[in-house]
Each structure stands twice: as C-alpha cells, then as structure tokens.
Image: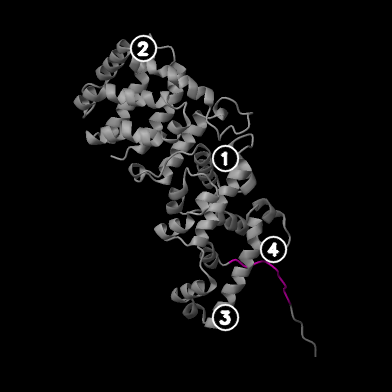
Amino acid sequence: MTSELDIFVGNTTLIDEDVYRLWLDGYSVSDAVALRVRSGILEQTGATAAVLQSDTMDHYRTFHMLERLLHAPPKLLHQLIFQIPPSRQALLIERYYTFDEAFVREVLGKKLSKGTKKDLDDISTKTGITLKSCRRQFDNFKRVFKVVEEMRGSLVDNIQQHFLLSDRLARDYAAIVFFANNRFETGKKKLQYLTFGDFAFCAELMIQNWTLGAVDSQVDDMDVDLDKEFLQDLKELKALVADKDLLDLHKSLVCTALRGKLGVFSEMEANFKNLSRGLVNVAAKLTHNKDVRDLFVDLVEKFVEPCRSDHWPLSDVRLFLNQYSASVHSLDGFRYQALWDRYMGTLRGCLLRLYHD
C-alpha cells in the first residue's frame, strides 16, 4: 500500500514587524524577549519561553544580516539571498529610515560629524531613546547626506532614487540635509516650541525658492546650497526702510487697506516701522554665514515675539503679511519687485508656520 504526500518547500524570509520594531528601537535580545512576554504573546500562542527566546534571536540574526543591505536599499531589491516580497522590502526600508521627532530636534542643523556623534550619549539620556537607536538614526542622516549633497537634480528625487523612501519621508530627509548643509540654528531656548515639522515646512519653501535650483535645474548642489547671488541682492531691499518716504508710503498703504479689518489695528499701526525694519534687515544680513544660521532666531525675535506680546491672533498675522507683501507693488519708487516677491513669498509662509498664537 502506497501513500501520497504533498510537500511544499519555501524559503521566504519571515519578518515579524513587532520584533523588527524592537530591534530598530535598540533593545537587546533579552529586553526584547521580556517586552514580548509582557505583551502576552506566550498566552496567545501557547509557546514556551525557550521557543520565544529562540524566535527572537533568529529574527535578530536576520535583521543584522539585512542591515548592510538596508544601508543601500537598491541592493536589497536585487539580492537573491533573502526571498522577501516587495511589500515587505518597502516596509523594512521605510521603517529602518524612520526617525524619532525627539531625536531629530536635537541634531537638526548641526554638522553631521564625529563631534555631534559624541553627543549621542547625552541625547539618549535626554530623550529616553536608546543609544543604539540614536546611532542608527544619526548614521542614516549622515549616509543620506553624503550620498546626495553634491548631486545634480532634485534633492527629494535623488533621495527617493537612492534610498527608495516614500515621498513624505524623502521630503523629511531633504529638510535634514538642507539644514545640516546650511547649519541653521534650531537649538536655542526661544526655538524649542517649534517642531521638526515646522522647520521641514520652511525648508521645503526655501529649497523651492531660495536655492540655486530655484533658478537653474542643471547645477550641482542645486537644492542644498542657498543662491548666493540672491542673498547678495537682498541688500537692495533696505531701501524700503532706509528711504523715509518709501517707509511712510508703505505704512500708509497697509494701514489704509487693513483699517477696520484687523483686530489689532492700533498695535500694528504703532509698531509697523519696527516690524518692517526687522523683516527687511533680516534679508539684508543674509550675506553673512552667521546671519544665515541665525535666520529662525531672528524671525522669532524680530517678528513672532513682538506680535505675540501684543496678542495678535494668527488670522491678523496672515492678513498683515499678505497686505504688507502686496502693497510693495504699489510703491512706484521701488525697483526690486521680483526680488521682494522671491524673498517675502517664502518668508510669509515661514512666519505663518512659526507663529503659534
């Protein structure tokens, strides 16, 4: 008597998302096992503690072997050792490059160097993120920066092409690269209320309008370096506040347009010249690297804080900035309208994002 037996042999690499998260979070095998036990997995599966230990170790070994491929994600797609479905490959890559908000806020704008890496112990203690996870995230930032910093073409497109990240995550990394390259100050106490999302929003506006790529899509570093010629030209905007007649006319146009529409009209009218001088002087100083680095500090000091102290609601800030920007086009004696629009178009968006009423 013969029996027929169907046998199926597969070599698909199994990925447990929960264990992967524990590995990415920097937990040791023993800590990961303890956390899995606490989640109730033994009761749910009927497994023993020994089996759970073995399963966790097996997953960790797999992740360690995959890590070198995750450093260059296209290699993961083309290798033949691990049979991983495309959807799983995308998940592995996306989660490997995902970062913690608390961590990125500590390093945003800093040089991605050994000096900063030495601070990771302190950052780990401050944020409660494991040192191992801090190192992974820092090394990811540095790796992406090194690959794309001198490439021609769109920064977001280059990141997506070389690291296969989602559009949203690629845009976040573009902001990190842009801030690291230009060394914007983000750590001062008065900036602590701002989130990474706030800075990333501003980075995207600046990349679109203030970089070399905004005027020439064929240059190297086009989305990384600010357009130096544009920054030099911004000195011409000083005429708006240095010329008394222009300043008075600008104020008159704004006040006429906003009378009866602004809840803080009297405060705006009294403080118009100080606010205008602040915004124009920020532009005029951007020829110096230190002033570029202090851009967000200056915007908060010169505009956000004065408006906050007078209790401007965000709706009034928006009305004022829109009219303040548009009224310049009615100043016959002012010859730098296009330059003004390139500057204020971006600055207006940033200020509205920075202003938390």
Instruction: Say if residue 41 shows up in the picture.
Output: yes
User: Which residue is pictured at 41% across the width and 25% down the height?
Assistant: 283
Where is mark 4, residue-wise? 82
From the image, give the main secondary structure of the stretch colored magenta.
Answer: loop
Going by the numbered disc 4, the residue's amino acid type is: Phe
Q: Earlier in the sequence, mark 3 or mark 2?
A: 3
The CA distance from mark 4 to mark 3 is 23 Å
The CA distance from mark 2 to mark 4 is 66 Å
Q: Image quadrant of residue 7? A: bottom right
Q: Image quadrant of residue 219? A: top right
Q: Is residue 284 left or right of residue 303?
A: right
The CA distance from mark 3 to mark 1 is 44 Å
In the rendered image, residue 342, in percent from the top left (x then y), is placed at 46, 24
Where is mark 3, residue-wise? 51
Where is mark 2, residue-wise? 331
Which disc is residue 156 wearing?
A: 1
